Image (spheres, rainbow, N blue to C red):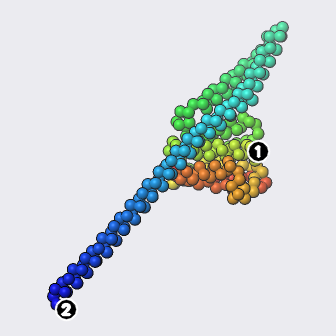
Amino acid sequence: MDNLSQGITIVVGVAISLAIVAIGIISLFLNYRNKRLQAIQETEKMQAAFNQQLLQSQLEMQEHTSNMISAEIHDNVGQILSLAKVQLNLIDQGETLDRTLLADAKESVSKAMTDLRDIAKSLNSERIKLSSLQEITELELQRVNRLGLMITSLKTNGETKNLQEQKKLIIFRIIQESLQNIIKHSKAKKIEICFHYEKDILRIEVADNGTGFDKTLLEKKEGLGLQNIISRALVIGGEANINSVPGQGTVITIISPYE
């Protein structure tokens, strides 16, 4: 082979090699771009799901609060004021002033005013924003206690850490939904909520000593409230585990990163 042929062969070989390298680089770039676009689309979908869940949680919290307040006014404040009215009527009918009965009437009115102040505080959305998750959960447990059906308690382990405001609202809604399920279905006499502030995550346990249930209900996608708890935890980048044994109560564990 003469020098010219060798030169042509070398040039062709180099050209082919460069073409292969170029094709490889272009393929890598296109692959990277596609993955990047998929990642962006996935992030946008997750953000949209988060925003949708946040809005739904806010609306459900408002509805839940309105229903609870309506029940409290009817069952607690209304009864207390009715009692005060009876006490005042008895005082008015008496020939002499019954100071003991008057003191009881004053106490009834004072209790009604205290309950109404608590209700007014619960209507203030800024209070939820400015309060910690433990504080608004404690207020929720106080409402449950006033139903007179069960005893509640709240414990905290570890050093308290702040949560994103939007994430706090969704977690609080998960807690509310857990409590509603307990009140409606468990026949429990005791509820205990425990906040575990760990290094990278917040772990919340909502436990009751009620009737429990068969976990196959979750596998069959039955129990909409429980499914909502699981799906909402996923939206905030966490998870929810539900462990229950018939006759031995239920423990709902909510796990969420702080950020």
Q: Amino acid at mark 1?
A: Lys
Q: Which residue is mark 2?
A: 1
How many neighbours does mark 2 have within 10 angstroms: few (below 14), some (14-19), or many (20 or more)?
Answer: few
Q: Which residue is mark 1?
A: 189
Left or right of residue 96, residue 131 in this image: left
x 19%, y 91%: residue = 1
Can residue 151 be seen here? The reply is yes
Q: Is 201 situated above or below 85?
A: below
How many neighbours does mark 1 have within 10 angstroms: few (below 14), some (14-19), or many (20 or more)?
Answer: some
Looking at the picture, how far across and down is residue 231, in whole percent?
60, 52
Q: Nearer the viewer, residue 192 or 183?
A: 183
Q: Is 155 situated above or below 81?
A: below
Looking at the picture, how far across and down is residue 257, in whole percent?
52, 52
The picture quadrant where one finds residue 14 is bottom left
Q: Nearer the viewer, residue 236 or 75?
A: 236
Can residue 157 be seen here? The reply is no
Q: Rounded to the nearest whole Å, what is the CA distance between mark 2 and mark 1?
A: 98 Å
Q: Kindly check if marks 2 and 1 are in contact, taking CB atoms under 8 A apart as contact.
A: no
The picture quadrant where one finds residue 124 is top right
Asked which secondary structure carries label 2, the reply is loop
x 53%, y 33%: residue = 126
Looking at the picture, how far across and down is residue 204, in whole percent?
61, 50
